[in-house]
Amino acid sequence: MMPADAIKSVITPLLKDWLIQYGRWTDGKEPKRYAVVRPVGGGLATLVRRPQFTLLLIGAKGDAQTVPSMAADSIIEAMRKTNGGLVCMRAGEPVYSNTNDGRHTYEFSISTITN
């Protein structure tokens, strides 16, 4: 299993009402919640690989700040419980910001280790 697939397999069941995107955020016409998995590089490609990602959680217009915050917390806890498989995931501390139109966002890093 590839690290991006492992991340998606953890977050998909937790984010049932969210649109999951890979690479960059593309806003739609309907007010939705978005989860964007973005690769940001990692160490040298050796036998043990350490790709790095960020996960950006964007609440829908009108959502309370707690919506993406609670989603971030549940994902981080799920990653703690799933470690030890083919892909080990470690999440960083979520950082709050908002979009130009006032939607609440949380973003955090995800370090993976796979061989």
Image (cartoon, rainbow, N blue to C red):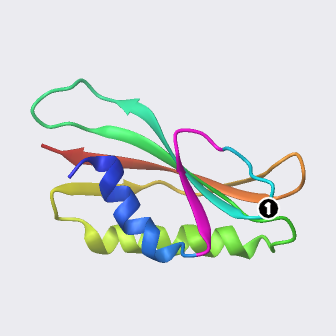
Q: Please tell me whether mark 1 sits on a helix, a strand or a loop.
A: loop
On screen, residue 96 versus residue 64, left or right, reads left
Please say if 58 is above or below 18. above
Residue 92: image x %, image y %? 47, 54
Residue depicted at x 48% and y 75%:
14
Q: Quadrant of the C terminus?
A: top left
User: Is residue 13 rendered magenta in the image?
Assistant: no
Amino acid bearing label 1: Glu
Please say if 4 is above or below 23. below
Q: Image quadrant of residue 8?
A: bottom left
Residue 95: image x %, image y %? 64, 53
User: Is residue 23 rendered magenta in the image?
Assistant: yes
Residue depicted at x 77% and y 65%:
60
Residue linked to disc 1: 30
Residue depicted at x 53% and y 57%:
93
On screen, residue 57 versus residue 108, left or right, reads right
Residue 36: image x %, image y %? 56, 50
Residues drawn in magenta = 17-25
Mark 1 surroundings within 10 Å by alpha-carbon count, few (fewer than 14), some (14 through 19), many (20 or more) = few
Residue depicted at x 54% and y 72%:
15
Please say if 21 is above or below 73. above
